[in-house]
Each structure stands twice: as C-alpha cells, then as structure tokens.
Amino acid sequence: MTVSSPAQLPMAALADRILRREAEIVGWPADLGVQLCARLITHIGRVIGDSGARIVFERSVRLVQIEFPLLVGNPKGKLDLWLDLRVALEAQAPDVSGRACSALVATFIGNLSTFIGAGLTERLLEELWPGAHRPTQESS
C-alpha cells in the first residue's frame, strides 16, 4: 500500500525525511532545526497568519518539552523563539539535538494537520519539500 498523505504517514517518518533533505543544504543540527522551523512557520503563516503559525509552533514546543526538557525557553515566558531554540539545540550532543528537532517538526506537522486539515497541510508541505510526504524506496 502506498502512503501519500501526512494524515496516513507517521509524522516522525515524514519529519525525518524533511530533516535529512534539509541537512544536505543547511548542515546539522542546531542550524538545521532553527532554519527548518523558521521556514515552516513563515510558509504556514501565509495561510493561518504569523500569529497562528507561532501559536501552533509554541504549542508543539510545549508538547515536545515533555520528552526533551532541553527545549525549555526563557523562564520569564517571553520567548525569543529562534535564539532560545538555537541555544537549546547547540547545548546538546548532535544525536540528542537531532532527535529533538525531529520530534519538534513531527509534532508541529501533526498539530498543524489537526488545526487546518491533512489535505491543506499536505499541500503546504509539498510546496516546501516536493515529494517529502511520499516514502522513498529506501525508507519504505
């Protein structure tokens, strides 16, 4: 059976494919995590607004903090989202940072899919990463 939508595909596998694709361009892992999330939020903001995209992303950070408390931001509650994310990721070993990035992207995509629907989420991801929602032969 061929899986073709984010709603059917495990979000972790989708996030891993996107991260691997981006790692070839940006590097790994702190720069990748920050740039990937910023790119995704900017793109999604076209549809749900910048504030809406940030709220969905911040919710995703909060959910991922359960498994990766390293992503705790500024204790005063005023997040400099990109600086806090970069500092948190750079402070970790690359494998921990990579797993945290993957969990964060997967959670963000899942939350987004819940909020705006799987079809629109798939179209927006396809615009950024053509074919990422389709497993490659090596990952299927």
Image (cartoon, rainbow, N blue to C red):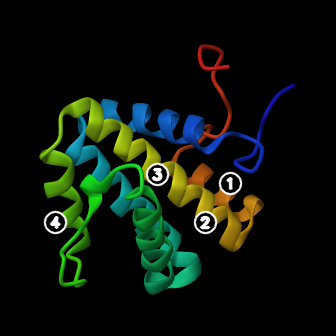
Q: Quadrant of the C terminus?
A: top right
Q: Tell me the quarter of the picture where residue 121 sits.
A: bottom right
Q: Which residue is mark 3?
A: 105
Residue in the image at 25% along x and 83% along y: 77
Which sits earlier in the primary sequence, circle 1 or circle 4?
4
Q: Position of residue 106 (x, y in %)?
A: 53, 49
Give neighbour class at mark 3: few <14, some 14-19, many 20+ (Cα, 10 Å). Answer: many
Give the camera-side residue of 27 and 109: 109
Amino acid type of the residue tagged 4 in the rendering: Leu
Amino acid type of the residue tagged 1 in the rendering: Glu
Q: Which mark's residue is nearer the viewer, 1 or 4? A: 4
Q: Which residue is mark 2?
A: 112
Which sits earlier in the primary sequence, circle 3 or circle 1?
3
Give the camera-side residue of 130 and 35: 35
Q: Is residue 126 visible?
A: yes
Amino acid type of the residue tagged 3 in the rendering: Val
Which sits earlier in the primary sequence, circle 3 or circle 2?
3
How far is mark 3 from mark 2, CA to CA?
A: 10 Å
Under circle 1, the secondary element is helix
Q: Vertical placement of 82 versus 139: above or below? A: below
Left or right of 44, for residue 136: right
Under circle 3, the secondary element is helix
Q: Which residue is mark 4?
A: 83
Give neighbour class at mark 4: few <14, some 14-19, many 20+ (Cα, 10 Å). Answer: few
Numbered-mark total: 4
How far is mark 3 from mark 1, CA to CA?
A: 14 Å
Give the number of the disc on residue 122. 1
Q: Position of residue 136 (x, y in %)?
A: 63, 22
Left or right of 100, for residue 113: right
Q: Quadrant of the N terminus?
A: top right
